[in-house]
Each structure stands twice: as C-alpha cells, then as structure tokens.
C-alpha cells in the first residue's frame, strides 16, 4: 500500500505553458493582388514560447525587475512593435541607443535564466493558396492553419518530456470574440480528433482548457513571446537578412531526432 508521500509524488505533474504570439497577418490575397501590390503581407507566423510552470515565478520576478530598472515601475507592457520603433514608453531607446543595447542584453539574460523552449509555425500565404487553390476558394484562415501546425509541434515537445503526468497549457492574447471562438474551435477539434498527420492520442498531453488573456493582465510570458516572435518571422520571410536576435534565440528551438509516435 502506498504511503501518503508516495501517492503525492506519483501525482506530481510536469506542467508547461506555451505563450503564443503572431506576426504578419491572417488576410488572404489573390495572386493578382500580390502582383499589383508587392507590399501586401505574404506571411503569417506564430511563435510559441514554452515555459515550465515551476519557472513562472522566476520569469515574473525578473521581468518586473527589468521594468523597474528602466521605467521605475513594473506597470509596463512590453510590445515588440513599439520597442523596435521606439514609440510611447520606449522612446527612451530613441534618445539612448546604449540604453537600448542594455535592454536587449537584459532580455536575453532573462531568457537564459528561464530556459524556455521555442516552437514556431510560419505560413507563406502566397505559396499556400497557389499550392492549394481550395484554401483561397473557401477563404480558409491561415492563422488557424498555422495554429494547428504549432499544436503539432507543441504536442511533439510534450511527448518528449519524461514522466507520465505531463500537461501542456496554452495562453493567447485576446483578439476579437469571433477570432477567439474560431481558434478555440480549432484547438478542441485538434485535441479531440487529431490532424491529417497525427491522431488524437498524439495530443493527449494538451490541456482541456485554453486561456485568452487581455494585455492589461501584464503577463510576462506573453510579452517575451511577443518580443521573440518578430525575429522568427523575419527569418522565414527574409532568410538572407542579418538577424542577430534570431541567432541567439535559435538555440532554444525544440529539436528532436524524429517525431515521437
């Protein structure tokens, strides 16, 4: 008969949270539209920043300290677009380039201490509808397609973790109610039915709950995901471009010799 301590140990859950962020957009355009306007967005990239739940408090603490160091308050939401363009609260980096370099170093230090894993799904929308004209005809959502690809990679990560009680949660920032409902539907369809390539048992370690959080909750994991997603988008869309942050982050990409069955 198990002792109480043994029973508790057997129930220990190895839990992770994937913080999701996107770059590019979900809009579809015809080939004629791309020819007329080459500047139309051709990519939709999703990046998953996977953090062990036992590292969440450390991440929250270190992000709070970083914000207080630069802004004297932790009531700051890091937003990649505003940071890159030195807008709003991040205008301090426009007037202090060395300060911006220091900020980037501290962000990397946080990532190293948290030891995340990264998975990415990037869809070339222009190629997608050329190869699969039905996608254009039925106005399929490239965001949903990229999301399902990402779930396969997240499940792949979870299936490589040791122990029987592995659980993978997922946290997304709120968009519109319609978009959130569509993603929720795609999520539960995938874990209940599987995909074209993986059966439903492949996704059994994914949580039966999906969280949508507003930016005002100031979630550290979501902000790091937002900060890290752009380099992956650039790497896919412009692989020839110098991309130092991607080079630093690439060591955290989850690779495996083969897909687990």
Image: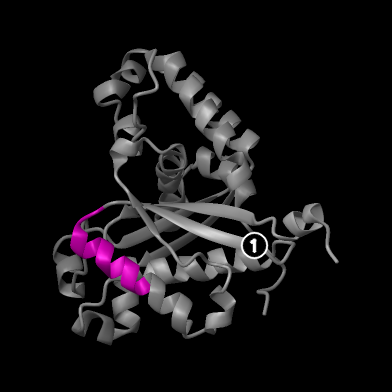
Q: Residue at x 45, y 54 (%)?
A: 47
The quadrant of the rendering that contains the C terminus is bottom right
Q: Position of residue 119 (x, y in %)?
A: 53, 57
Q: Is residue 17 above or below residue 216?
A: below
Q: Residue at x 28, y 51 (%)?
A: 174
| Pick the front one: 55 or 224 | 55
Residue 183 colored in magenta in the image: yes
Residue underneath mark 1: 166
Q: Which residues are magenta?
A: 175-186
Q: Residue at x 16, y 73 (%)?
A: 32
Q: Rate crowding at label 1 as few (under 14), some (14 to 19) or many (20 or more) other CA atoms within 10 Å.
A: some
| Pick the front one: 133 or 259 | 259
Residue 173 colored in magenta in the image: no
Q: Which of the 4 quarters of the picture holds residue 225?
A: top left
The quadrant of the rendering that contains the N terminus is bottom right
| Pick the front one: 197 or 180 | 180
């Amino acid at each position: 008969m198990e002792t109480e301590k043994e029973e508790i140990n057997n129930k220990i859950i190895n839990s992770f949270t994937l913080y999701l962020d996107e770059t590019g957009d979900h809009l579809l355009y015809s080939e004629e539209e791309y020819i007329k306007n080459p500047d139309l967005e051709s990519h939709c990239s999703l990046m998953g920043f996977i953090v062990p739940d036992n590292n969440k408090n450390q991440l929250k603490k270190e992000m709070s300290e970083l914000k207080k160091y630069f802004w004297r308050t932790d009531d700051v939401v890091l937003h990649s677009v505003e940071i890159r363009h030195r807008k709003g609260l991040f205008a301090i980096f426009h007037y202090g380039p060395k300060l911006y370099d220091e900020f980037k170093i501290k962000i990397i230090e946080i990532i190293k201490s948290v030891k995340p894993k990264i998975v990415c799904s990037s869809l070339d929308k222009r190629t997608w509808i050329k190869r699969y004209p039905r996608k254009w005809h039925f106005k399929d959502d490239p965001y949903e397609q990229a999301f399902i690809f990402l779930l396969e990679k997240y499940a792949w990560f979870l299936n490589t973790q040791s122990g029987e009680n592995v659980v993978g949660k997922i946290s997304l920032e709120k968009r519109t109610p319609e978009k959130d409902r569509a993603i929720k539907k795609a999520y539960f369809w995938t874990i209940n039915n599987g995909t074209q390539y993986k059966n439903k048992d492949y996704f059994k370690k994914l949580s039966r709950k999906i969280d949508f959080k507003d930016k005002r909750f100031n979630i550290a994991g979501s902000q790091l995901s937002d900060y890290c997603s752009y380099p992956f988008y650039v790497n896919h869309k412009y692989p020839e471009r110098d991309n130092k942050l991607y080079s630093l982050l690439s060591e955290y990409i989850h690779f495996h010799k083969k897909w687990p069955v």
